[in-house]
Image (spheres, helix red, strand yellow):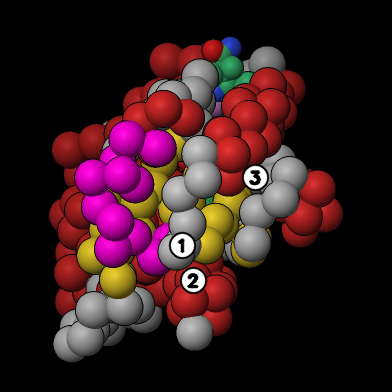
Amino acid sequence: MAKLEAIAQAIEAGKIKIVGGLVAEALADNLDPLIILNQGMIQTMSIVGDKFKRGDIFVPEMLIAAKAMKKGVEVLKPHLAGQADLSLGTCIIGSVAGDMHDIGKNLVAMMIESAGFEVIDLGVDVPAETFIKTIKEHPEVKLVAFSALLTTTMPAMKASVAAVKDSGLHGFKIIVGGAPITQDYAVQIGADGYASDAGSAAVTAKQLIA
Ligand code: B12
């Protein structure tokens, strides 16, 4: 547990240079990669978010914590992703227009990939047109995944889902997620699926295309 605490403190303090080493040490101590991710890292980002909300820290501190988290995820990634031997199809994923958050989206991409999908990650601040263009370029696509972390980008998610549905393209399911997104909202905007975290995103993704 001391190792988890050290990882959490390093992420919160944005100590980018030492996070990777601490995660490697925790793995060498046989700590479960999912526990390192959930308890050492994701929980810490919630604490960072709460401090930001209270005005105890500002955007630069939040950004540097995010960078430290990314370093840790890089080391963790090979230990989280299972070896899927058959392809379930292509999944296109991106953070919706106006949204620069990508840590959660990257984790979802990683878990969906390890569930057996080929993942095309469009990155952050992705306009609806880019999703549509990419679907056209990849007619084999089975899943389109939208991420939004801000209440102010939820309308962009709604508009993106609507644009993709109105495009007349078909043969795929739509999954949405992100901290402010709920099952009710997903249904309201016409998405086929919703998941609250990366682990359940992979499970839901498989169920949607079954
Ligand atoms: C790190 C961070 C940043 C970083 C992002 C860096 C990066 N590369 O991602 C930076 C500093 C850039 C940033 C900027 C801003 N941020 Co910010 N940020 C955060 C913070 C602290 C952590 C987010 C995070 O990475 N969480 C950890 C990951 C693992 O969790 P997650 O993202 O929720 O993802 C999980 C699930 O949601 C789900 N999921 C996510 N996507 C998807 C997609 C699918 C398909 C599915 C199924 C599931 C799914 O699975 C994920 C993994 O389990 C949050 C606070 C918080 N508690 O979330 C604030 C937070 C989201 N930010 C906030 C704000 C206000 C901002 C800014 C507007 C600040 C400003 N004044 O400039 C800007 C907006 C920039 C923009 N246009 O997007 C607010 C949002 C408030 C609101 N209700 O809208 C929050 C909640 C902080 C707060 N408490 O006020 N931010």
| Ligand 1 positioned in quadrant | top right
Residue count near mark 2 (Cα–Cα under 10 Å), binned few <14, some 14–19, many ≥20: many
The amino acid beneath tag 3 is: Ala
Mark 3 vs ligand 1: CB under 8 Å? yes
Mark 3 or mark 2, which has the lower sequence index? 3
Mark 2 to mark 1 CA distance (whole Å): 11 Å
Residue 92 or 169: which is nearer the viewer? 169
The magenta region covers 132-143
Task: Name the disc covering residue 205, or none.
Answer: 2
Judging by the rendered image, the residue that carries numbered circle 1 is: 172
- Amino acid at dot 1: Phe
Classify 10 Å Cα crowding around label 3: few (below 14), some (14-19), many (20 and above): few
Which numbered tag is attached to residue 179?
Answer: 3
Q: Give the structural element (helix, strand or loop) at label 1.
A: loop
Residue located at (40% from left, 37% from top): 132
Looking at the picture, does residue 111 appear above or below residue 210? above
Q: Is residue 171 left or right of residue 162?
A: left
